[in-house]
Amino acid sequence: MDKKTTSVDGTSLAYRVTGEGPTVILVSGALSTGLTLAPLAAALADRCRAVVYDRRGRGASGDTAPYAVEREVEDLAALLEAVGGEAALFGLSSGGALVLLAAASGLPVARAAVYEVPFNDFLPEGPQQQVAYAAALDMALAAGDRGGAVELFLRLTGLGEEMIQRARQSPMWPGLELLASSLAYDAALMGDGLLPAELLARVPVPVLSMAGSLSPQWLRAGAREVAEAVPDGAYAVLEGQTHAVEPASLAPVLADFVTG
């Protein structure tokens, strides 16, 4: 990350700016840093000024206890001020929950786009699973079991035990464990996982909610519900895409929305 700004509670936030055009801040999801979205920023660069940043507790950004979801909204407020005072926001997965919250909170957001925020209204026993996951995650982190915390998240996403054990043996595992404590932040953002209809009804800007055609039905249904819950929403399906959306497929649709 090339630049730094400071949130209201003194937390240092690292970010990078790529390209020219209308500004869009890209917000990553769980177990990721700003660099996770760097390929998307590069794909947007010919049409947008894309900003990636490390959310608090990740990468080159700092962290200040105690955590509260409101601190991450304040982080976005600091970033918005640092990059010119107003911008569009894009959030991937649970990062989308933060984007929607920020937009509803009255920040100077021009437009808000999200991809497959994992609201679980259409997942059987979704809220119960989310609450049980958050409780088990808190126990693992309190015990210092960062690897166990990562495993809990991977199981929540539906990854099988064999794949989880393969992941443990992979070169990427130490980096995932470094991000383990931030899993609690995404769990706090998602709450019980149900779509926050009252909050979404307060979003004052256009919203584009996207999903992949190959993603599970509950994620696609949830993405459509987001578009229907906001006052000015649109729903788009990216053909051939899963939750691990490819920048080459996402970038043109996102750029059209940001520049429209």
Image (cartoon, rainbow, N blue to C red):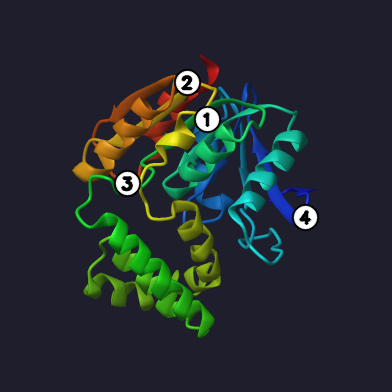
Q: Which residue is mark 1?
A: 44
Q: Which residue is mark 2?
A: 257
Q: Which residue is mark 4?
A: 9
Separation of residues labelled 4 and 3 (CA atoms): 33 Å
Quarter where residue 152 is shown: bottom left
Does residue 143 sit above or below 113 in this rendering?
A: below
> Could you tell me which secondary element the residue under label 2 belongs to?
helix
Tell me which amino acid carries mark 1.
Leu
Mark 2 and mark 1 in contact? Answer it, CB < 8 Å.
no
Tell me which amino acid carries mark 3.
His
Separation of residues labelled 1 and 4 (CA atoms): 31 Å
Q: Which residue is mark 3?
A: 243
Q: Earlier in the sequence, mark 4 or mark 2?
A: 4
Separation of residues labelled 2 and 3 (CA atoms): 20 Å
Separation of residues labelled 2 and 1 (CA atoms): 12 Å
Marks 1 and 4: which is nearer the front? 4
Furthest residue to the bottom? 143
Mark 2 and mark 3 in contact? Answer it, CB < 8 Å.
no
Residue 82's disc is none
Q: Earlier in the sequence, mark 2 or mark 3?
A: 3
> Could you tell me which secondary element the residue under label 4 belongs to?
loop
Separation of residues labelled 1 and 3 (CA atoms): 19 Å
Left or right: 12 in relation to 26:
right
Q: Earlier in the sequence, mark 4 or mark 3?
A: 4
